[in-house]
Image (cartoon, rainbow, N blue to C red):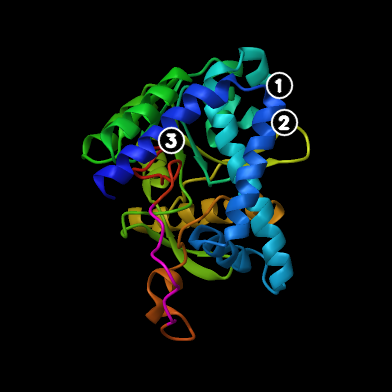
């Protein structure tokens, strides 16, 4: 990214946090939808990648159905950003009523046990709002990990934003993040990691909607090494202003096998839980990058090498993070 583009990007996000949060909520909602529809109509790289990913999630979908999904997906994605820009100005009551989390007893009971809890989420709906709900409704701070963004001032904005919501944010690059997360868990704390996309190229291979991809090993490794509870979480929007969510039952550590074998089994269980939420609400899955191995390395596709798409692959959007290491940028 050029220095000029970095400054423009930083300025746009700064404008979002300084200005959008001051708008009346109905105005912010309309603005987000207008931007989403304009982006969708341009059919740029992000929209086409979103449709390609939805084609895996909804096999056999017609081009018209995929177009409908991508339009709804862009609206969901912009809802995420409008909410995130406004979250620092939301009252505690607005945050509490803005989330409806089912089966939260898994999280509450896990924290009460004193063993620590790892929450693992995919890029569904608004994971920042879910985090704010945890710190507000449950009065529980937590630790996450953020990808270092460029320019550094943009990374600093995201860290300040999330710290303002009650999160401890660790930088992804550097070997100390995993150790710090493990210490927080051994102290009975909470760690939250977005974990449906591995950016390290060394993640665990899993089956996901009938094809292979990689997901980060961090959540499973942390649970094994610390004895913490590992809980998948899925989120979604409906037609109301309230975001819905579900805390899934714990992913158990297998009784037998090597550490690598246990990690593989547990990461596959996370992928299966993520898939249930994504299949039910595909339009709320904000995966605007390549994910499956066949897309990352076309030579691995059953059909052989594919013709590269026009345009370059987008860099990870802010909010694109993965769990062994990647929390929320």
- Which span is picked out in magenta? 306-315
Q: Name the residue furthest right.
A: 239
Residue under label 3, please give it. 12
Quarter the C terminus occupies? top left
Per the rendering, the mark at residue 242 is 2
Magenta residue check for 10: no
Is 284 displayed left or right of 157 in the figure?
right
Magenta residue check for 310: yes
Q: Earlier in the sequence, mark 1 or mark 3?
A: 3
Q: Are marks 2 and 1 in contact (CB under 8 Å)?
A: yes
Q: Nearer the viewer, residue 157 or 299?
A: 157
Q: Nearer the viewer, residue 109 or 298?
A: 298
Q: Earlier in the sequence, mark 2 or mark 3?
A: 3
Q: Percent position (x, y) of residue 50? A: 56, 60
Dot 2: element:
loop
Q: Percent position (x, y) of residue 204? A: 39, 59
Residue under label 1, please give it. 97
């Amino acid at each position: 990214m050029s220095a000029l583009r970095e400054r423009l990007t930083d300025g746009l996000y700064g404008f979002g946090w300084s200005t959008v949060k001051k708008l009346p909520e109905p105005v912010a909602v309309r603005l987000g939808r207008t931007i989403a529809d304009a982006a969708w109509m341009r059919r740029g790289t992000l929209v086409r990648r979103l449709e390609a990913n939805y084609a895996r999630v909804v096999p056999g979908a017609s081009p018209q159905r995929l177009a409908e999904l991508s339009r709804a997906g862009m609206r969901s994605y912009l809802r995420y950003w409008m909410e995130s820009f406004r979250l620092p100005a939301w009252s505690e009551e607005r945050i509490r009523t803005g989330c409806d989390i089912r089966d939260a007893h898994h999280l509450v009971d896990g924290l009460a046990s004193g063993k620590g809890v790892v929450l693992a989420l995919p890029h569904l709906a608004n994971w920042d709002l879910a985090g704010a709900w945890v710190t507000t409704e449950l009065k529980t701070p937590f630790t996450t990990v953020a990808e270092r963004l460029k320019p550094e001032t943009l990374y600093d904005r995201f860290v300040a934003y999330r710290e303002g919501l009650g999160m401890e944010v660790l930088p992804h690059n550097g070997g100390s993040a995993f150790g710090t997360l493990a210490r927080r868990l051994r102290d009975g704390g909470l760690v939250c990691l977005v974990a449906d996309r591995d950016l390290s190229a060394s993640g665990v291979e899993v089956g996901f909607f009938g094809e292979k991809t990689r997901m980060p090993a961090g959540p499973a490794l942390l649970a094994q090494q610390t004895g913490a509870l590992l809980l998948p979480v899925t989120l979604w929007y409906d037609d109301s202003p309230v975001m819905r969510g579900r805390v899934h039952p714990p992913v158990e550590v297998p009784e037998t096998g090597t550490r690598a074998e246990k990690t593989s089994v547990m990461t596959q269980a996370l992928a299966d839980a993520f898939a249930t939420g994504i299949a039910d609400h595909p339009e709320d899955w904000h995966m605007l990058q390549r994910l499956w191995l066949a897309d990352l390395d076309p030579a691995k596709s059953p059909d052989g090498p594919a013709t590269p798409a026009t345009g370059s692959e987008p860099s990870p959007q802010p909010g694109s993070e993965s769990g062994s290491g990647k929390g929320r940028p």
